[in-house]
Image: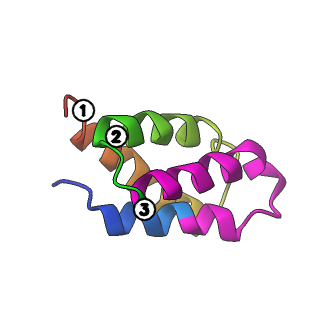
Amino acid sequence: MSADIASIANALRAIVQNRDKKALNYAVNYAQCGLTMINTGSPKKDIRVQLLYILNNITHWRGKEATIVRSVIKEAIHSWKGE
């Protein structure tokens, strides 16, 4: 199953909306940049690299929403491998 852009954008918006969480420090800026990349039609390989940065920076974020966001990002990273 391939990750769709809308799900990824929603996941990134969730990170931005939770910007007050200390665990999301740098991830908020990376997520904002990722949303810009999606909105401007950047290639999937470039967005995938951004998602790797985001995933690395949300490792300490906890909760149900965090789990969902991580799974969406991981799915996108794996499904876009080689594109």
Q: Secondary structure at mark 3?
A: helix
Which residue, given by chain and number where applicable, does mark 3 sit on? 39
Task: Write the residue at 45% across / 51% down.
Answer: 37
Is 24 left, or right, of 71 in this rendering? right
Q: Secondary structure at mark 1?
A: loop
Which residue, given by chain and number where applicable, does mark 2 sit on? 77
Residue 5 sits above or below residue 59 on the image: below
- Mark 1: amino acid: Lys
Residue 74 sits above or below residue 66 on the image: above
Q: CA distance from mark 2 to mark 1?
A: 6 Å
Task: Write the residue at 24% across / 40% down.
Answer: 80
Which residue, given by chain and number where applicable, does mark 1 sit on? 81
Q: Can residue 78 be found in the magenta stretch? A: no
Question: Looking at the rendering, in which quadrant would you find the C terminus?
Answer: top left
Q: CA distance from mark 1 to mark 3?
A: 21 Å
| Magenta-highlighted residues | 13-39
- Mark 3: amino acid: Asn
Dot 2 and dot 3 residues touching (CB under 8 Å):
no
Q: Can residue 15 be found in the magenta stretch? A: yes
The answer to which quarter of the image holds residue 47 is: top left
